[in-house]
Image: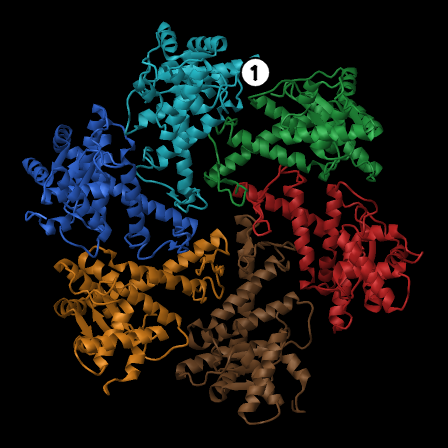
Chain colours: A orange, B blue, C cyan, D green, E red, F brown
């Protein structure tokens, strides 16, 4: 391992990695080094291998039309812009529209400090960032694509947890809903059991809608208000395909964007 | 393999083919060549074998009444006409009323470019094309046949996904519905779990209806407005049983049909 | 096999027979010939064996009261009369009140031509024929018996499919309902999954009712209007127990019954 | 076997007996003959053994209070009286308040002729007979006992079938409800699947109620109107514990009870 | 076995005992005799062992606060008082606040005669006795404890059976609800299947409530009206921990309590 | 074992410990003694090991931000303050914001005496203590964190039991809801079966809400009214990380806090 390697930086970029993931990471970095006929694994080998381990290898060879490239760029720009515009959101580490594994692009965020708790305000900001891509597509193309399906599923799950697990709905208060059905069957859970009435289920749905609606409204407001920043990020992505943290922060600074609180 | 073989053309016509499917395709083409006592597999052998691999062998021997032939011809003509009349729809490659495997006829469409995303407008056009056969039967015979059952099932599935997976309903927004129940049991999924209330389920049903209704209205309008083109395609099919892309485009050009946007 | 055997006639009377069924049929015919000490299997042996293979052996020995014989005769006469009175229904091949296997009587219909599609009008006529026995019992005895339970179950299933699979309800349109739950468990399906809301389920039920009501009204109207024909068929059945196609058509002709369209 | 044995009488009294049941019956009759040191099995041995095979051995030893004896007598008298008072009901063969197996008393009815069909009127009469015990308890003791639980369960099942299987509700017509769920699991069915909406389920429940209400009203009316006959039957039962067909018919004749139609 | 042993008394106190239970009882009595170095098992050994077999060994060693002792005494006094105050209830054999196995105290009732039937009035009295402890706690402490959870569960089950199995609701009549789901899976039933509509389910719930409400009202009225008797029983229990039948009947006689009918 | 060991104190602090847990405790204490090179296990070794066995080892090494420390301190202070302010609540034994296993902090309560029963008032106090952390976060930070998810789940379960198992809702009375589904499958229960109608389910939900609302209101009132005490406890925790019983009681005494009844 080269002296350049700073394991703290690697650690910050690999939250949730299992031992096997870390072993895999070292292996990929070694392969990358060997391909370049180098005898030492450098910091660059490690950092580049993180994304490969997380999301699969790059797929530059895949033909992509100009339309789709633009769509992808505005989608990721939406995520990044909303993250930059909200105080409670985690900072953006990297934006990319290079295909990896199953995804067509990605925006990586990393928390400033290790956290034991999450507050309602932080969750709302996370949701708004999730809807950044959707809001950007709608604002720019007046149409929606299938590119938001992962964002939508994860945001819905999170909104459900706010209401049914963390007591974050004022209307429903500190009450949990849905016993986790812990019948492990052939290694998988069977999902949560409905332990409340239909009428309460309707209220839960309304509260989930309220949380999603609030976060979506914040995302839409940001992409509309800062359309110039959105265009700038998207154009840079179309041109360079990837923006690292420093480049992104410089761009944000240029537009004098001041992050505000979501609540 | 003969020099005439253009693998790019084969590739465009075989999206979603697995390695095994491609091996099967080469085998079928070789058998076809052998039947003609030829030593080389030509482009024609390959192209003809694609449909055999996809849908099973032709069943020309099957007796078919004149009534059913006409019904089948108008049904496929309906699909093809709607596809030609909508900007967002994929172009028609081939129309046929020769039975193959389980189907009595088919209309093949192929996208102009490889796609990573699908937009709401493209999905709406796909749905309208699906209902083209149904709309044509209704317009011509004032009756409906069982020939649309596959179209109906696939269109319903797609409409569901627009609403519950891709956030394409304005009323429901970017929220997903129905956790995929991932208990793989003896190798099969158990379907999606209802993770929303009955009252929300009613709204989801109304939104699915709205999408289906919009696409059906578009299909009905097209087959009524361009009835002359519909008759022309159907008559050609009754006579020749098959129309290739070039023939179809010539026919469309004759009627000066201009594709319009669905939205 | 005797020269008298006309395999086309056998083929028309054995739709849906598997290879094993056909082998069984030849075997039964051979047994029948052997019982008569004949060395050749004749057309008669074959035709008589068809019904035995389909529905089990005749059970003439079973004691049957005069009341039940009359009930059975009117029931089958009802089916046959409605079939004869509707243009879209298949022609009657044979009527019988001789018990076979589990059934107390039967009316055999066979389509005029092999069909790939079924239209809404043909299905409605099929439903009306199904209700012919029920309508006849009600008209003649002012009571209903358990003899219609099979007719009712099959008609309900068909009416469901019209609405939920073939898009034949104007109100619900081309939309399918109820994913087939394909978890094959110990060799059996688990039935269809409800993939729609309760409110839509109510509409589906109303539409099934509308279709059943329409077909039942047609059946009732026919048995009332042509009561004389109904009596004639029933009386012949009480006397002879069986009416073949020619006899039935002669009887219908005598009454100058003109088939009308159901729609 | 003694010459006195009339197998026709045995056959009439053993409907639904399997081969094994019949073998068991002969065996029990032989044991009874052996107990009496007789070398021949007589008609009496056979007839007495029928009930033993059907319901288990008599349990005369069991202590029974005078109150319970009276309750039991009126309960069985109720069944028998309603059967005698309705034209469509099967005639009473025997009444007994001697415990056998799990039951505290029984009333045996046997149809006059073998039946292939059951009509709505016959079913209604069967239901009224089922409620005869319940109606008699209510009329005599102004209270209800657990002695009717079997009657209630069987009557409910039958009422359900009238409505959901035989199309005998005028309001719902010839439509079946509830697919039998045929997943045989470790040798047992899983019950019927609800294939209709909640709103239709409410109508089905109302129709079941209407049928039960009609039959119960008939039973109540009969035990009230013919209270003297009811008392006579009950008193005879308290005294003799068993009434055979001839004795019962003589008693009915004495009161000049004329059976009426239920509908 | 000592001559003092009266097996009839043992039999009356051990209803529902299996052969194994009886063997266990004899064994426990023999152990008790051996502990006292006696060679004969006396009536006292047997009677004392009955409760041990039924509910487990006494747990006098367990520390119990004065508050809990008073609570327990009033709870059992409530059961006993209601039993004594109702004509249809079974007589009280013993009251105890000594812990045994899982229970903190108990009131033993035994029927006067063996019963084949239970009437509605008897069931209502049983329910009122069940609620005696709950009503006493409420009247004396103005609070409710977890000590009634067993009473509540058993009373709810019984109330359900009155309505859904025995036809004892005037509003619902002789109709059963809920097919017992007899899929025995690894040796256990799966519970009853809902074979009725939601609207009928609401009526069933209201009827169960009505029955529970009636019995609870009777229990409350008795503990209020006879508060002096309740106090006397509870005080005796706090002092002596156990009251046998004779002592209890003497106490009741002193207060000239006359049992009344519940209906 | 050192003479200093007072097993009574150990017993009071280890309610619900199994034999295996106690063996584990002795083992951990021995390990702790060995680490200090001592030959005797002292009281301190034992007491410190109790928490390790209950909640896992301390995780002081884990980085924790000042914000999270303050959040954690106010959360635990909320629990402790509410416990101190309510007569019916158990006394506080220890408060800590040192991470152990999965929890970020804890407040240990122990009952004054062993209990066989729990009253409604005691349960309400327990619920209010559960919501102490939630109420404190809301009062101090105007936001809610994920730190209350365990409190919320346990409080919801308890509130459910009050209503559905212990008859502690005045509106629903002594009736139990939800049969425990005892199909043990691969060693786990399948949860409770809904044995009541939707309309009753709505009432149950409203009653659960009423109980939770009452307890939450009590908790909110206490943290607001005694904000100075809350701040004092939280500040002490931020400084010392742990408060033992004596320290806590001294602090409470200083503020002259008088516990009141919850009802």
Pick the front one: B250 or C93: C93
B53, above or below F150, in the image: above
How far across and down, in percent of the image, does residue C45 sit?
40, 16
Position of B91 with respect to B62 (left or right) is: left
Q: Position of residue D247 (x, y in %)?
A: 79, 20
Depth check: give the residue in front, C39 or D54: C39
| Residue E33, placed above or below residue C73 | below
Instruction: Tell me which residue sits at (82%, 25%) in the image.
Output: D38
* Tag 1 residue: C64
How many numbered circles are shown? Answer: 1
Residue F79 percent location from the top left of the image: 54, 76
Residue appearing at x 82%, y 31% in the figure: D35
Residue C181 in sight? yes
- Front residue of F219 and F60: F60
In which quarter of the view is residue D229 placed? top right
Vertical order, D198 against F123 (above or below) = above
Instruction: From the top left corner, tell me how far across and down residue D205 is, in percent.
Output: 54, 36
Q: Residue at x 55, y 79 (%)?
A: F53
* Residue closer to the observer: B103 or D88: B103
Q: Residue furthest top?
A: C254
Q: Secondary structure at mark 1?
A: loop
Residue name at image x 58 percent, y 14 percent? C65
């Amino acid at each position: 391992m080269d002296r350049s390697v700073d394991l703290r930086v690697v650690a910050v970029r690999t939250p949730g990695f299992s031992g096997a993931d870390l072993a895999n990471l070292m292996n990929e970095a070694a392969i990358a080094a060997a391909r370049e006929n180098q005898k030492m694994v450098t910091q660059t080998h490690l950092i580049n291998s993180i994304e490969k381990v997380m999301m699969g290898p790059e797929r530059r060879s895949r033909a992509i039309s100009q339309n789709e490239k633009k769509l992808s760029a505005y989608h990721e720009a939406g995520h990044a812009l909303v993250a930059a515009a909200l105080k409670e959101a985690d900072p953006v580490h990297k934006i990319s529209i290079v295909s990896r594994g199953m995804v067509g692009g990605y925006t990586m965020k990393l928390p400033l400090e290790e956290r034991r708790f999450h507050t309602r305000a932080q969750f709302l900001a996370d949701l708004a960032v999730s809807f950044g891509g959707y809001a950007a597509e709608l604002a720019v193309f007046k149409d929606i694509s299938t590119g938001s399906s992962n964002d939508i599923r994860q945001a819905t799950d999170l909104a459900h947890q706010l209401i049914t697990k963390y007591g974050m709905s004022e209307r429903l208060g500190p009450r949990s809903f849905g016993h986790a059905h812990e019948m492990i069957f052939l290694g998988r859970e069977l999902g949560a059991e409905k332990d409340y009435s239909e009428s309460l289920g309707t209220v839960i749905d309304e509260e989930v809608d309220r949380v999603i609606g609030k976060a979506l409204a914040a995302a839409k407001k940001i992409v509309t208000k800062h359309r110039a920043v959105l265009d700038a990020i998207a154009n840079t992505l179309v041109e360079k395909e990837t923006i690292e943290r420093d480049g992104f922060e410089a761009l944000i600074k240029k537009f004098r964007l001041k992050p505000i609180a979501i609540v």
